[in-house]
Image (spheres, rainbow, N blue to C red):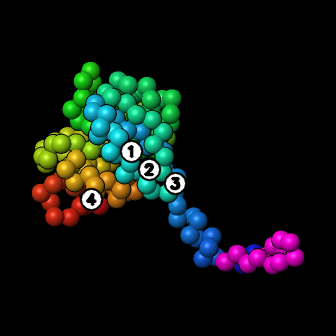
Amino acid sequence: MAYSEKEGLVEVETCESRLGELRIMAVRILLVDDHPIVRQGLRTLLEARPGWEVVGEASDGREALDKVESLNPDVVVLDVTMPRMNGLEACRLIQQKGRSSGLEVLFVTQHDSPQMMREALDAGARGYVVKSNAARDLLEAVEAVSQHRVFTALARSPQAAC
């Protein structure tokens, strides 16, 4: 316990109260999807989590590469199918630059396919979530990948695998 005096009163800070503060982990997130309405929905879900901040958005893989450099996110939430540069290629290039810094990639995509999920993981992603289940899986997935754990969930799978 720590004691401090404030206006003649003694405040007691317990280990439990400090532990609660430590559980809130700050996570800086970059959203990458070519549909603004999807980015808006993902932002709403993510920013409801205390300590999490969406630091930027991009609409394609090339823009994502620039934003990774300038914004230094912890997690990139990335779509597969986008113009100019798809998410798989962007993921490979992001990982070439950012793996040493602890940067992680989470795909949130319409592709409910084990083959596409394998391609995403092979490209260097740490997680894969299907958009149709983003409301169910997104927060848990970001939490996992931000802690450098794998998270995968296809729409037809009854439970996510961590």
Q: State the quadrant of the N terminus.
A: bottom right
Residue 61 appears left or right of 13? left
Mark 3 vs mark 2, foreground winner is: 2
Q: What amino acid is at disc 2?
A: Glu
Q: Are marks 1 and 2 in contact (CB under 8 Å)?
A: yes
Taking the image as drawn, is residue 104 in sight? no
Cα distance, mark 4 to mark 1?
15 Å
Circle on res. 43:
1
Q: Are marks 4 and 1 in contact (CB under 8 Å)?
A: no
Per the image, the residue denoted by label 3 is: 51
Query: Based on the displayed image, in which of its 4 quarters is residue 8 positioned?
Result: bottom right
Q: State the quadrant of the C terminus.
A: bottom left
Which residue is painted at 23% across and 36% down in the image? 80
Question: Where in the figure is residue 75, as x and y percent of width and height?
Answer: 41, 44
**Of the residues under marks 1 and 3, which one precedes in the sequence?**
1
Residue 34 appears left or right of 119? right
Per the image, the residue denoted by label 4 is: 136
Q: Residue furthest right?
A: 8
Question: Where in the figure is residue 45, as x and y percent of width and height?
Answer: 37, 51
What residue range appears in magenta?
3-14
Q: What amino acid is at disc 3?
A: Gly
Front residue of 93 and 135: 135
Per the image, the residue denoted by label 2 is: 47
Q: Residue furthest top?
A: 84
Secondary element under disc 1, as helix, strand or loop, is helix
Secondary element under disc 3, as helix, strand or loop, is loop
Label 1 neighbour load within 10 Å: few <14, some 14-19, many 20+: some
Residue 144 appears left or right of 72? left
- Predominant SS of the magenta segment: strand
Which residue is painted at 26% across and 48% down in the image? 128
